[in-house]
Image (cartoon, rainbow, N blue to C red):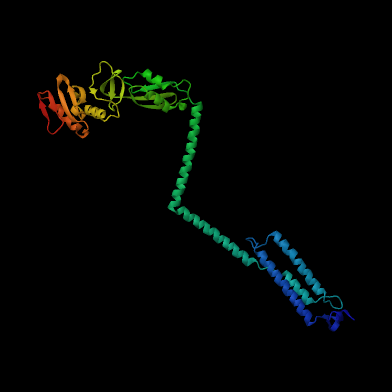
Amino acid sequence: MSRGDETGARTGPGGTARRTPEQERQAAERARRIRERRAAERSAGSADTGETGRPRRADRAGERDSARPATAVQTDDDAATPDAAGTRDPGRAGRGTADRAAPRDTGGTARERTAARTAARTAARTAARERAADPRHRRRRLVALAATVLVVLIGLSAAVWWALGSFGPPVSAVEVSGTRQIPVHDVEAAADVGTGVPLAAVDTGAVAARVSAIPGVASVDVGRIWPDTLSVTVTERTPAALVETQDGLQLVDVTGFVYRKAPPDLRLPRLQLPSVGPEDPATLAAVGALRALPEPVRGQVETLSLGAGGSTFELGLTEGRRVLWGPWSDTAATAQRAEVLGPLLEREGSVYDVSSPALVTVRR
């Protein structure tokens, strides 16, 4: 039996083998499966395609590897139906070659992905421009820039100050100003700034605290005069009255503070109150009344004491005269009482009553 008879193929004129309808159907089915598999491979390859529409090198190599078994199957199928001379069907071979040579249609997908990326970049640039044009965005950027500059300046200042405090010029002089009754050398001794100490390293707060402890000092301002001078500006207490204490006659300043022994030649009104201090309401009212008096009248006041019942003031003047001041708690009338007392003292009398500024009286 011939080979054509064994395979069930028909032999045409000239000895050429012809396929049966069943063989044609099987070959068409195999070709269809091969095309479907290649289409699936092209779809999977297009997912990894770059902007140029070309698959990556590793994927292309994998595609070639996966295509080889398909070609081998196709060759085996064609070889299964040879003619008597061992030749394959020219039409089948032509179809397989055409299928292998057909290009994969991945350009459309690559173009779509490239267009999508371009649109995304354009949208991002548009959003960035819109944010830059937003006034709130500009304010936030300015605030962030200002904060950054501030932090940098603080860091530089700290570094410079540390360098001056460690290696800067030392203090060579202490300049004292504002003193009238306090000796300058007392202020310099209280400042107690050692020689060789860098000017930037001096604790100005500690210096001010030591100088403030001097009796008669109301406030102190300590500063630096570069390159090597420490300045100490003193504000002395202003005496307003005198008070008799266990330590002798003491000065009382305008705040009611008793601060030091009074000089023997100083003439000021004496407070004759149960207690004298900056927290005593009667002391503050007495100092306020004395300061409200005109200078010529204040020079005539020798004492200030409590009246009957302790709710009023009584001023003792020169030549034995007295002034009934009225309730010391009524500080709102202090300025009016001081104003009418000056002209009233020009009249002859020994007792002057200004407790009611609108109705003053003079008694002989």
Residue at x 22%, y 28% (from the top left corner): 289
Q: Percent x, y for residue 35?
A: 71, 72
Q: Is residue 360 left or right of residue 46?
A: left
For the N terminus, the quadrant is bottom right
Residue situated in front as seen by the camera: 55 or 154: 154
Residue situated in front as seen by the camera: 138 or 173: 173
Residue at x 47%, y 37% (from the top left corner): 154
Q: Is residue 63 visible?
A: yes
Residue 203 falls in image quadrant: top left
Residue situated in front as seen by the camera: 295 or 177: 295
Residue 331 falls in image quadrant: top left
Q: Is residue 225 visible?
A: no
Q: Is residue 147 above or below residue 337?
A: below
Q: Percent x, y for residue 328?
A: 21, 31
Q: Is residue 169 above or below residue 126?
A: above
Q: Percent x, y for residue 353?
A: 14, 28
Q: Residue furthest right?
A: 1
Residue situated in front as seen by the camera: 95 or 24: 24
